[in-house]
Image (cartoon, grey):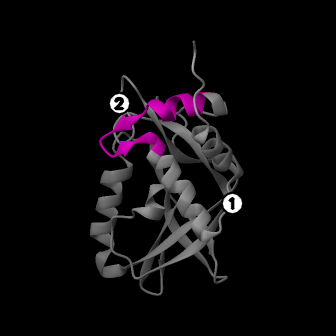
Amino acid sequence: MIDDGVHWVFGYGSLIWRPGFAFVRSERALLRGLHRSLCLYSHIYRGTPDVPGLVFGLARGGSCGGMAFAVADALWPETLAYLRERELVTDDYLEVVRPVRLASGATVQALTYVINEAHGQYAGALSIDEQVRIVRRGFGISGSNADYVLNTALHLRQMGISDRALEALVDALETPIPDVA
């Protein structure tokens, strides 16, 4: 986890566009063996227990493009405490260290958060129609679930990262709901 006096954090969802911690540099990165999936019911940040939203998790298989952040060794204790408070609120994620390949070609060990499939909020692989239904309704302490999904898609596009499943969801979210007469 330490590389040249820094610790690395891999972000694949809102950490990309709202890390919330100080870092000395950031770089596009690729994580193999896990993929970004809208597979976790959100009862706090993007939904409530009564009307859950959906947030991203890293699920088994494939690969995931995201952002790696280098955190200075001196700031690591407070950064780690912040990340744990943010990401481990209900133990729906597991804190792991995985190798990520930086855009510059180096491979570093990065802290990241993967989905805990044994947790009750794990949604699994939902159909796109079900994802759209949940995301359109979700609203939590961090705002609208749709904004979360659209912000993630926008930032991935700006970084030149293609995520076909997310783009299909964005297209479906941007399609107007037909009027029922």
Instruction: Please say if 2 is above or below 110.
Output: below
Q: Is residue 38 left or right of residue 43?
A: right
Q: Residues within 10 Å of mark 1 (few under 14, many from 20)?
A: some
Instruction: Please say if 12 is above or below 58.
Output: below
Helix, strand or loop at label 2? It is loop
Marks 1 and 2, the one that precedes in the sequence: 2
Q: Amino acid at mark 1?
A: Ser
Q: Is residue 90 left or right of residue 58?
A: left
Q: Residue at x 58, y 68 (%)?
A: 158
Q: Residue at x 39, y 40 (%)?
A: 46
Q: Which mark is residue 125?
A: none
Image coordinates for residue 118, horizontal then vertical, percent: 52, 33
Helix, strand or loop at label 1? It is loop
Q: Residues within 10 Å of mark 2 (few under 14, many from 20)?
A: some
Residue 58 visible, this angle: yes
Is residue 131 one of those drawn in magenta? yes
Q: Amino acid at mark 2?
A: Thr
Q: Residue at x 52, y 55 (%)?
A: 152
Image coordinates for residue 59, horizontal then vertical, percent: 61, 46
Instruction: Please say if 175 is above or below 152.
Output: above
**Can you identify the residue that label 2 sits on?**
48
Q: Residue furthest left?
A: 78
Instruction: Please say if 83 is above or below 142.
Output: below
Residue 121 visible, this angle: no
**Can you identify the residue that label 1 sits on?**
162
What's drawn in magenta, residue-wise?
130-146
Question: 171 or 152, which lies in front?
Answer: 171
Q: Residue at x 36, y 26 (%)?
A: 49
Image coordinates for residue 62, horizontal then vertical, percent: 72, 53
